[in-house]
Image (spheres, rainbow, N blue to C red):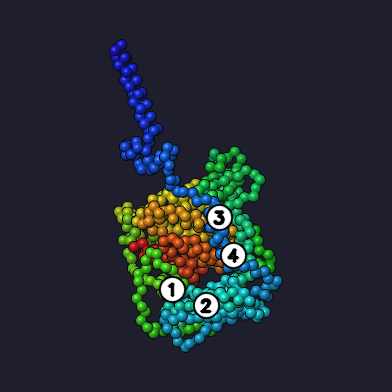
Amino acid sequence: MKMMASRNSLWVLLFIVIFLVSFTVFRNPPELWVTFKLPVSFNRWNSVMNSSCPTVPLNPPVSPKETELRVKEVLEKLDKQIPPRPFPHLNTTTSATHSIATILKPRDKYCVGDQLHVLLEARDYLGRRKEYGGDFLRTRMSSPAQKAGASGKVTDFNNGTYLISFTLFWEGQVSLSVLLIHPSEGVSALWRARNQGYDRVTFTGQFVNGASQVHTECALILNSSVKLCQYLDAQDQEAFYCVKPPDVPCAALTHMHSKNKDVSYLSQQEKSLFVRSNIGVEIMGKSNVISVSKCNTAPMKEKCKFGMASVTPSGYVWKNTWNPASCSLAPIKIKDCLRGKFIHLMGDSTLRQWMDYFKSIVNTLRSVDLHEIGKLKHQLAVDLDEKINIQWQKHGYPLIGSLVYSVKEIENIARIIDRTGGEKNTVIVISLGQHFRPFPIDVFIRRAVNVHRALQRLLLRSPDTMVVLKTENIRELSSDVERFSDFHGYTQYLALKDIFQDLNVGVIDAWDMTIAYGTNNVHPPQHVVGSQIDIFLNYIC
């Protein structure tokens, strides 16, 4: 009996202890976590959840109204640069063969470092001078034997005349090129058509239903009366939709692929502007070669470093190697530079090329199998001895690809940035653009604005974190123009420069670089990717 009484007393005592501990926990959870030295994240989470004292959320939400005002502001700036240009007939549009390009103050010999100017007078197919600007031009100088190239700078006087300025970076025989990519009337038509619809690309979502699969239509916007699954980024209010399969939960979406839809917002007359023979037509003619000599010693340039102001053109190619215009690239041992660093690449397949380059050059990097499939799978490569961690992750919807890719882990870049602690050895590289071209540009602007704000938050809490922005590459001239024209990429390039101008980020001007290289390929060859990475290494080391 004494044994039983003693055991009962112990149970009562244990119950009292549990009650007191529980009471203390619920009254002062943060203090108790500190006492027990539990992880900081738990302490922070409980502090936020505790309603007994005022708290500040980790990521204060930006009002949707504020975001939309910024989107509208950027969009209005672009709108002003692309006024409507209706045309009654093809003959009234800009003609490359009838337009006249004249070298101003021509000389027999030029010196390295000189500025050469070309005056372009745009004319239509009837030989009449155009009275307005807006033609989409691509200007480049090159010396194929030296594997050299650089872009030119275009000034549009909005009256049918343009001033094209070339900086003569190297000696030798130099060819000048002025291509009419699209006449101003075509530019206006592409701009109007782009912002009219979301359905030039259609997505198919794959849902798992037990041992079988169900496929339904998905899109950024779905005009459907049936029940939809909404995949919402709650903080930034960006959404993607799929038709909900019967008796299958929305969370069962696992994979996605896309295809081009037979939809166009261009009239038949407008389409005639975009036949291949009318795209990228040379204006300069045969008198386009000049001779450049090395007259003076070139001034010394400082080493390229993070945060330097950008110039136009940003540099030139010589013997397939990139040379920045305003600074010099120092030779850097890639492994020494990457030692101890966490490199997070976020974006499209043009940035995945960086991942492939790192793995091909640093032979001690080992790929980690993250058990995903497809070309858009999350990639991780590490060198444990040197403490190098490099990963590539695709950006959120829209992602265009005829091959099936996993969306189990898909999320917008802004959310990944918000989860990043950041410090001096953390480097974030971002590239957005190619997958947004077929959709109204407000989709791209909104995404860029939200990424910009996430980076602002990151740099507030971790100012030592390094952020690098890679702009878009130019792509094939023969690409489906209404969906993928470089004009769409150029407007995004301008928007990105506007949105990120106030942030202390390093910029790799891939747009200008790929024009200089003359690649015309969305996935440029390895030596071009290597040149982009040379700039990156000079920024971070």
The 10 Å Cα crowd at callout 3, few under 14, some 14 to 19, many 20 or more, is some
Circle 4: element type: helix
Q: CA distance from mark 4 to mark 1?
A: 31 Å
Point 61% across, 65% down: residue: 190
Between 454 and 515, the one lying in front of the other is 454
In this rendering, would 327 be left or right of 282?
left
Tell whether label 4 touches label 2 (CB within 8 Å): no
Name the residue carrying label 2. Answer: 164
Residue positioned most to the bottom: 108
**Picture coordinates of residue 529 (x, y %)?**
43, 65
Asked if residue 432 is positioned above or below residue 251 in the image, the reply reads below
Point 70% across, 71% down: residue: 88
Circle 1: element type: strand
Name the residue carrying label 1. Answer: 316
**Picture coordinates of residue 84 (x, y %)?**
64, 67
What is the number of callouts on the image?
4
Name the residue carrying label 4. Answer: 79
Point 44% across, 45% down: residue: 57
The 10 Å Cα crowd at callout 2, few under 14, some 14 to 19, many 20 or more, is many
Q: Amino acid at mark 1?
A: Tyr
Asked if residue 495 is positioned above or below residue 396 in the image, the reply reads below
Q: Amino acid at mark 3?
A: Glu
Name the residue carrying label 3. Answer: 68
